[in-house]
Amino acid sequence: MKYLSLLLACSLLVGCATDYVKVPRVPAWDDVDIVYEAGDVRRFVFAEVGVFPSLSDSEYTPMSDDWVDRMLDWTWHFSHATGIAYTAESFDCDKFAKAASLAAEIAAARAGVKAQPLIARVYVMQKLPFGGVPATDGAHAVNAVLTETGIWIIEPQTRRKTELKNYPNKNHIYHVAIGG
């Protein structure tokens, strides 16, 4: 476990190669030069999904669509290169969502972005299948991102995404966490 933590930290921050795996750097950030205040984000999320989000910061910035696609590719390659796979409870859906959020936050920090990236961990009752994950009627975690073209829901385990308005479990979202 200690080795895996070191590999994760090394690869997220600078990219690295070991005797076992070569992991590229997190994709460089594409700045969209837009910043929203926390109150605006709180009202916007509530208007879209009917849940007030947990916010950790005072300023937030959307991401470019191109960067989101590159980030999804990076997280996919990282998890496969390191052998990280779904493991009940220790690395399940909420850890995949957390890893995607962390990748965005690290890329923004490396680029000197002062605002929190608008990538959320979204907790939902998985009543309908989405992104290769079957309906379970149990809790599930995905990501939501705000880009210049809208709000996208991402299944971080499979890289599949859809616009929020087309997300089949939109009415079953019970918690949204941005940052923190």
Image (tube, rainbow, N blue to C red):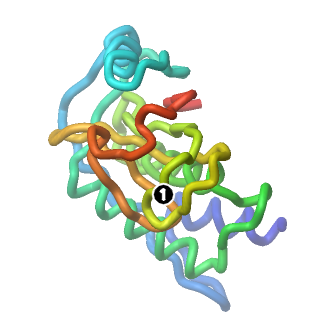
State the image coordinates of residue 174 (x, y, percent, origin top left): 56, 28
Query: Is residue 101 positioned above or below 47 on the image?
Result: below
Q: Quadrant of residue 125?
A: top right
Q: Quadrant of residue 69?
A: bottom left
State the image coordinates of residue 110 (x, y, percent, origin top left): 41, 48
Q: Residue 5 vs residue 70: left or right?
A: right
**Point 39% across, 25% down: residue:** 49
**Point 83% across, 67% down: residue:** 1
State the image coordinates of residue 59 (x, y, percent, origin top left): 37, 20
Q: Residue 11 vs residue 84: left or right?
A: left
State the image coordinates of residue 45 (x, y, percent, origin top left): 37, 22
Q: Quadrant of residue 88?
A: bottom right
Q: Which residue is mark 1?
A: 129
Q: Residue 85 vs residue 72: left or right?
A: right
Judge by depth and name the residue closer to the eye, 144 or 15: 144
Query: Is residue 152 positioned above or below 99 on the image?
Result: above
Query: Is residue 79 positioned above or below 130 on the image?
Result: below
Residue lying furthest top in this view? Answer: 39
Mark 1: few, some, or many residues within 10 Å (few <14, many ≥20)? some
**Point 57% across, 72% down: residue:** 79
Q: Quadrant of the C terminus?
A: top right
Judge by depth and name the residue closer to the eye, 58 or 119: 119
Type of amino acid under label 1: Pro
